[in-house]
Amino acid sequence: MLDITIREITPANYSQLEDFLYHAIFIPVGEEYPPREIIFQPEIYVYIKDFGLNTDCGVVAEQSGKLVGAAWTRIIPAYGHLDESTPELAISILPDYRGQGIGTLLMNRLFELLRRRGYKRTSLSVQQNNPAVRFYERLGYRVTDEKVDHAGHDDFIMVKKLTKETDEERRARIYPVILSEYNPAWPEWFIEEKANLEKLIGKDEITRINHIGSTAVPGLTAKPTVDILLEIHHATNLEKLIKVLSSPEYICLNEANLTMPTPPPHLMFLKGYLPDGFAEKVYHIHLRYPDSEDISDKLLFRDYLIAHPEAVIEYADLKKRLFKDYEHNRDGYTEAKTVFIKQIIMKARGN
């Protein structure tokens, strides 16, 4: 990163907010920037008009005496206004300085100032097709409402709590539910990890490895997480296996509560969970003995979907509906699919 200084905005910088307001306008790929005069429209200019009021707060990014970014909040009747105690945020980085982490530095410094002033939360408005939505989510903003702005764009209203984030809230933020269209590379990811597991654990300890879950069903919308059903012999040493599949690459769930030699269905390994979010390839490895009761159900569910395209469509539609309510509640999302999954398993059994 360039040598950047983040500091609180001063009155000498207020006039420069016009430049940053203009560059804050979201322009979809392929479209041209509108005339600069657009910022003087009342519904836009309100974000900087008479800046410097008691409730105004802002920070700037400076490089060699040049301002290259700014983030500020105001309590104003604008797009993301909630109430008189929630400041609305705007942020802008000059085009040549984007993608270098300056936005994150600005936001974190601004959050510090807002907390110091006693604010409990901050809001913003962003077009739904703006890639910045993910940036805001990574910083802790959550979608609370949807609106149509003056230009007819569909916007999200997003809110961030400024109070201390709990461990559970942080996990929900950095490990959200993500839905992707079917990726033909998923079976290749499975083959790659299957070979890796055989190498680490030893083929003699493994009775069977299956690719299960939604990523094993061609054409199905899914979380980009490859579920693997790993069956091991009863004689396999679980303590040794846990050591082999060790952190930080693998995360063993329920290890603390494991009563040897009680194994699956109480033991699972996660791979691809980084400290600040997901890796490119993410795996859930479900450990089982060959006679575990739920193995047949998992395979029946997968095979039924592969053989019934109409069920794939129904399942994909269900996922998309649930995503709206459970994006940051992975356990709730999984639980909400249970009824559908049980119905499919019953059909697969011929019941």
Image (spheres, helix red, strand yellow):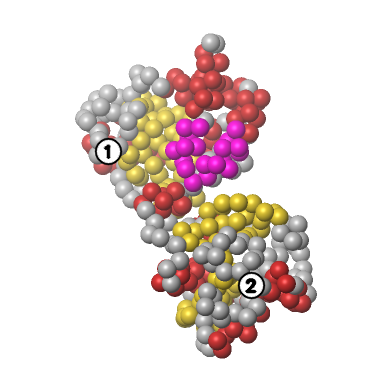
Is the residue 266 above or below the residue 52 in the image?
Answer: above
Which residue is at the front of the view, 124 or 46?
A: 46
Is the residue 290 above or below the residue 4 in the image?
Answer: above
Which residue is at the front of the view, 5 or 20?
A: 20
Residue drawn at (45%, 29%), measured in percent from left and top? 210
Main secondary structure of the magenta stretch: helix
Residue drawn at (58%, 25%), measured in percent from left and top? 305
Could you say whether the residue bearing mark 2 is in a helix, strand or loop? loop
Circle 1 is placed at which residue position? 255
Q: Is residue 11 visible?
A: yes
Q: Which mark is residue 333?
A: none
Is the residue 96 above or below the residue 163 in the image?
Answer: below
Circle 2 is placed at which residue position? 47
Which residue is at the front of the view, 52 or 4?
A: 52
The image shows residue 198 at horizontal and vertical percentages of 37, 35
Residue at far top of view = 351
State how far apart marks 1 and 2 are (Cα): 52 Å
Region rendered in magenta: 318-336
Could you say whether the residue bearing mark 1 is in a helix, strand or loop? loop
The image shows residue 283 at horizontal and vertical percentages of 44, 41
Is the residue 218 above or below the residue 42 in the image?
Answer: above
The image shows residue 23 at horizontal and vertical percentages of 66, 73
Q: Amino acid at mark 1?
A: Glu
